[in-house]
Every structure is written in structure tokens, then in C-alpha cells.
Amino acid sequence: MRIGILGLGRIGSFHAETLCGLDAVESLVVTDPLADAAERAAERFGAEVAPSPRALLASGVDGIVVAAATDAHPALIRAGIEAGVPVFCEKPVARTMSEGVEVLRAVREGGVPVQIGYHRRFDAGFAAARAAVRAGELGALHTVRSTTLDPAPPPAAYIAASGGIFRDCAVHDFDSIRWVTGREVTEVYAVGGNRGAGPIEAAGDADTTGALLTLDDGTIATVSNSRHNRRGYDVRMELHGFADSLAVGLDDRLPLRSAEPGAHFPSGTPHAFFMDRFAAAYRAELAAFTEVVAGVRPSPCTVADALEAGWIAEACTLSLRERRPVALAEVRPA
């Protein structure tokens, strides 16, 4: 098949390299507002360059991968729908939830499959945890702990446009909790602070946060996030049930060191970056998209899924600002 890539920054170039290694993909068409970026990608990946998104969609692509700036996501998703071309789009769906709701309406009216990029759904550990929960191996859950700790803050320009740590970072934890447990969040209470990043404070954001989530069956989930984890990129989930407990991310590259005498775990080189930790998941995610394009499977992460994680992020943002518990019903439209 012929796949178009819109946006050739860090993640767009990574996706182009991944797509080149998939048997289902025969050729790529690329476009980027920076002509030099498109030309470099074309030379590196043997791709065809389109001068604009409109020209790319008119070039006979079977599917498109949207890796452009967040502000462009709604228009590019709609353009794909109008052209009848399946869309893969990196999260978020849109900068604001109201824009996201409009995109969801367009998707439902257009009937074209759209997959949003929540790659943890394709990680072997998260998938195994979901299967264990679904099979009843842990019994009824009572506690879930989810962690995403970045080794260092992203650039100041990214922070200013990110929408905040809950919408940008913790949203992956929120999606994973929903996907693994099969439950919905009913209420949140969030706290946060800033301990060392001037640009983050200037943007009105927190660099370290904690959120307590109540799920619809009474399970309690805690989510911990930080922009400062010098030892490495730490993504984990713990699930505790009445019959057993299970952990995701508890491998030899876990960026922690034990204080216990004689303990040698973990002894591997710590994960340093999200592309390092989730390289296989990103490949599986795009392989799944080629199946969506081929019409042999539905979208494994819909716009509706992405918006549910977004509403949790909205509730946490409000809770942090107003220092109080927030029910999801407060922020999600009826």
C-alpha cells in the first residue's frame, strides 16, 4: 500500500523509518511545511514529496499518518475523512476538547476509520496485563499504580504549546488505565508543583504531579508524573487484585537502583527515552494501522477513546487549579 506522512519532525521521521520496514507498505509520500525536511526524508526513505497536504491526499495514498503540530490535527483528520482515506493521527486529537468533539462528530458522520496514537496499547507488557485482568487472573482489582517519569523536560517551546503535563504526559497513563482495566474514571483529585524548571513554571504548568483516580467499580488508581527523572525514562503500571498482583515495566532496564544489600536487580542500562522504551510498540501500532487501511480490523484506538483520556486530563487540570476533587461529569458534556 501507499502511505502518506504529514509532518516530518522527530516522530514523523521515526514513523517513516518504521513504515519502510513493514511488508505491507510499498511506497511513501511525504509533506512538511519545511521543504528541506521533506526533501531530507525523501532522500533518506526513498519517498515521493508532495508540496501540500491537499496534493498528498490527491496522489493516490491508501492511508495517511498525521505527525504534524497539534494545531493542524483537526483539519488534517477532516481532510483525510473527506478524501475517504483512513487516518492515523498522533495524540492529541486537537488542542482543546471542544475541537476534539467536533472531530469526533466528523468521524462518525464520515464513516472513515481513524486511529489515534496511544502506543502503550501495543506494548507487550501492557497487552499482557490487560489479558490477565480480562481473564480474571488477578481477581477483582482494588489498586492500580501508573507512572510516567521523563528523564528531562522537553524544550520550552514544546511546553508552552503542550496544554500542560496532564494533557501531554499523564494522558498516556489515563488511556492505559482505561484500556487495561476496562473501567471508567468517575472522579479525580490532583496535586502538583514545580521544583526546578523555569520555563514550565512560566507556562503556568507543574513539573511534578500526582493524581488519585476513582474508577467506576471502586478501584483506586494513582498516577505519578514528573519531567525530572535523571536516571532514565520510567514507565510502569502495577495492578493489585484480591487474587494476585502484576507489574508492567519491571524489567532489567528499569531506571531505579535498589537500596537493599546484595540486590542486583535491575542491572541493565536504564531506558533513556520513549522511543527506546517503546520502539517495538510503535512498530506494532503502525502495523495495526496498515490492517485498518486494508479493512481487516477496526481502529484499535478511536477518537472516542482518545477523548475519554482527554476528559480525565481536563478534570485533573481543573482539580489542580482549584485544589479540590472533580467528578468527570463536571467536565464531560452530557
Image: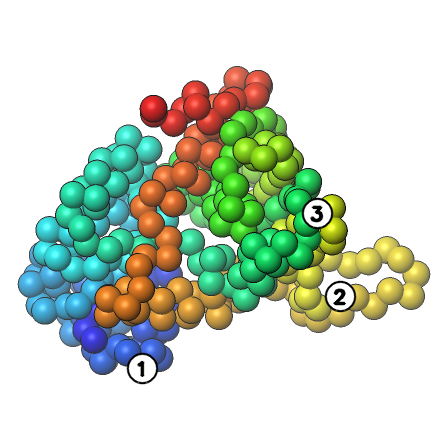
Front label number (2 vs 1): 1
Dots 2, 1 in contact, CB < 8 A? no
Depth check: give the residue in front, 116 or 219: 219
Single out the residue that lies furthest toward the right: 261
Q: Is residue 260 left or right of residue 143?
A: right
- What element does badge 2 sit on? loop
What residue is shown with label 3?
241
Front label number (2 vs 3): 3
Q: Is residue 234 left or right of residue 59?
A: right
Q: Is residue 286 left or right of residue 248?
A: left
Q: Residue at x 38, y 27 (%)?
A: 332
Place of residue 236 in the rendered image (x, y in percent of width and height, measured from the top left): 63, 54
Query: Residue flagged by tag 1: what amino acid is it?
Result: Asp
Image position of 33 with respect to 269: above or below: above
Give the mark, 2 or 1, whose residue is nearer the N terminus. Answer: 1
Image position of 235 with respect to 5: above or below: above
Instruction: Sort mark 3 into few (<14), some (14-19) or many (20+) by Cα contacts within 10 Å.
Output: some
Query: Residue flagged by tag 2: what amino acid is it?
Result: Pro
Q: Residue at x 42, y 69 (%)?
A: 284
State the image quarter where residue 103 is shown. Answer: top left
What residue is shown with label 2?
266
- What element does badge 3 sit on? strand
What residue is shown with label 1?
23
